[in-house]
Amino acid sequence: MKRENGFTLIEMMVAMFIMIAVVAAATGAIIQAQHVSEAVALEGNVQENLRAGMHFIVRDLTQAGEGVPAAGISIPNTAGGVSNVVRPGTPVASIFEDASVPPSTYTTLPPVIPGNTLGSVVTTVNPATGAVLAGGFNTDIVTILYADNTLVSSAGGAAAPLLTAAPVTSAAAPVCAGTITATGSSVTLAPACFTLPGGPTPITTGNLIMFHNINGTALEYVTSVAGQVINFAAADPAGLNQTGLPNGTVANLAVAITPTTITRVWMVTYYLDVVTNPAKPQLIRQVNYPNYPAAAPANPPQPVAEVIENLQFSFDIVNSQDPAGTYGLVGPGDAPTSIAPDTPFAFRAVNTYLGGRSEYPYTMTNPPQFLRNSLSTQVSIRSLSFGVLFPTPGILP
């Protein structure tokens, strides 16, 4: 009898078992690869945001104090040493003070102004429900000052003079026939010495201008520019112009009779914005003051990193003079702020901490969870890092 070709039932069952095992293994590998890919993508997203935010902070901290007098920049204050200057960029308007040592206020702005716990309450999100959860502590803010020494005249090409090359009014070469009103309401620049608006970033509304002569310094907010005239109208958003206060104003500098230079100063504030999108807090870089004029704000807040949950700063205070040890266990090398008699002028380095999470939950876990990471670094303040740390006895540094 001729044998018929085909497979037995046992052979079919074995083949099907092998096929199922191969498909199951392949499917498991694909699912595992998807989970790994998801985790890598989420972790990469966290790292990208942390590095982007830290890049901006480090860049500004490195420039802190550049072109600013060692004694800082005076701001309007009362006979009792109280200033009502508004700190830029914070969610809630506040004076230049630290919440831990009220009511101490600044009459002179240092290159780095700490803001221990002056920022928004730290927030996160429940990955299962999407509900925004408030943490139990406030984040920090920091404000950084440095001068713009790149502003050149609009005329003259590469040979154009810097804005700071000569006093506004100068009888010596180069002869400048500019004027500064006694109250500081306006500055008129001589075209022969500097042609407005200047470049590469022109002088415009919202800029801060430092006045400097042998009598000291003062800071004012540009409200408009018309031809060769820079105007500083009263009631500016910073509270700097023509306040009538007895100290820290342009009127105190006798600019009409004393050679005075002007310099554009950048005031950069970092803080977390948990209001615009509470589920995805943003790291904000605020240059000068926001929301003025209201119709077309000159300096709107700029987000530089997404989904940043925590922002903390601490400071290395050189030769701390605090006799009572009030910094606690952290010590002056990791102090959250300066406590009298120490001041921010003694900061030599800034320790920065950023904490972030993934934009979306990681679905491999049950329930889904966000991936989190942090980034920290220490930045030496270039203009303050080279002070005399060990002065000779009897000789002031």
Image: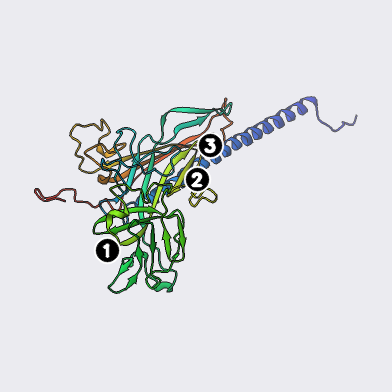
Q: Residue at x 81, y 30 (%)?
A: 7
Does residue 51 appear anywhere in the picture? no
Inspect the image, locate mark 2, and give the three-letter code of the amino acid beneath it: Pro
Q: Quadrant of residue 20?
A: top right
Question: Where residue 376 sits: x, y (%)?
Answer: 38, 41
Q: Residues within 10 Å of mark 1 (few under 14, many from 20)?
A: few
Per the image, the residue denoted by label 1 is: 257
Mark before the other along the chain sequence, 1 or 3: 1
- Secondary structure of the residue carrying tag 3 is loop
Q: Toward the viewer: 199 or 214?
A: 214
Per the image, the residue denoted by label 3 is: 280
Q: Is residue 23 left or right of residue 93?
A: right
Inspect the image, locate mark 1, and give the three-letter code of the amino acid beneath it: Ile
Per the image, the residue denoted by label 2 is: 303
Question: Where residue 347 sits: x, y (%)?
Answer: 27, 45
Q: CA distance from mark 2 to mark 3?
A: 11 Å
Inspect the image, locate mark 3, and give the three-letter code of the amino acid beneath it: Lys
- Secondary structure of the residue carrying tag 1 is loop
